[in-house]
Amino acid sequence: MSDTPLHDAIKIGIISISDRASTGVYEDKGLPALQDWLSKALLNPITFEPRLIPDEKDRISATLIELVDAGCSLVLTTGGTGPALRDVTPEATLAVADKEMPGFGEQMRQISLKFVPTAILSRQVAVIRGKSLIINLPGQPKSIAETLEGLKDENGKPVVHGIFAAVPYCVDLIGGPYMETRDEVCKAFRPMTAVRAPRAQA
């Protein structure tokens, strides 16, 4: 029998950014949506680090740094990525970046443009800080799922790949845990040389 866990444990930071939700004006739906989707998509045991904060640039940056320092290999934010005056999530994210990963934002906008022309107003960014990948996501639960999972035809075949298909390999490359997905939700892509052999059940 092996004592090696079947899947690597992973710590994920999830941040919902909203003035009104953080002050209790309305119920936050971002954190439940993120946690629900990630729990369905990943085979790894996950420890979530949730935060609900207002649209304040310095507060957002500080929270991102806090979660990276706490060992979160992946940090996902929702909210604050539009053109409104209080929407400062991208600026706060870029302020803590070691590297920018523009492909994530480009792909999210391509997915959302399938539904609404105003997707061009979205300003989501993704960055690397240390050994953590930080990604800004849209604010609506439906849009969160669409951008992470992608679009499929009636037979379940991907029409447009979601951004999460590239997340596990990106985390590999920056020294994080080996993330494994449920293919029926979102099949992760890795080069064959980067695919780890399945571990045997204990």
Image (cartoon, helix red, strand yellow):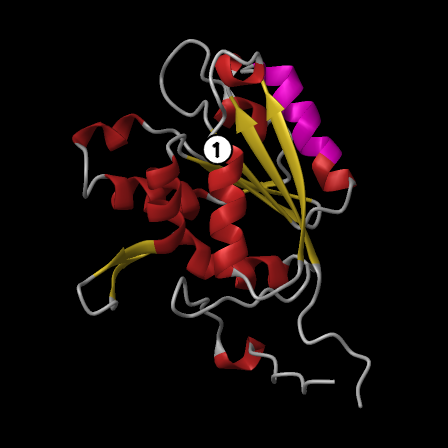
* Three-letter code, disc 1: Gly
Write down the quadrant of residue 51 in the picture: top right
54 vs 77: above or below: above
Residue drawn where x is 71% and y is 40% of the image: 68
Q: Nearer the viewer, residue 31 or 93?
A: 31
Q: Residues within 10 Å of mark 1 (few under 14, many from 20)?
A: many
Give coordinates of residue 96: x percent, y percent: 64, 31
Residue drawn where x is 49% and y is 71% of the image: 190
Q: Which residue is mark 1?
A: 30
The answer to whether residue 94 shows anywhere in this view is: no
Left or right? Give the position of 190 relative to 202.
Answer: left
138 vs 161: above or below: above
Asked if residue 59 is among those painted magenta in the image, a careful observer would answer yes
Give coordinates of residue 135: x percent, y percent: 51, 41
Residue drawn where x is 19% and y is 34% of the image: 116
33 vs 202: above or below: above
Give coordinates of residue 199: x percent, y percent: 66, 83
Left or right? Give the position of 199 relative to 86.
Answer: right
Q: Nearer the viewer, residue 108 or 154?
A: 154
What count of labels does the image hold?
1
45 vs 138: above or below: below
The answer to whether residue 70 shows anywhere in this view is: yes
| Residue that extends furthest to the bottom in the rendered view of this protein | 1
Predominant SS of the magenta segment:
helix
Q: Which residues are magenta?
A: 56-66
Report helix, strand or loop for mark 1.
helix
Left or right? Give the position of 77 relative to 173.
Answer: left
Give coordinates of residue 114: x percent, y percent: 19, 43
Residue drawn where x is 41% and y is 30% of the image: 139
Asked if residue 101 is among those painted magenta in the image, a careful observer would answer no
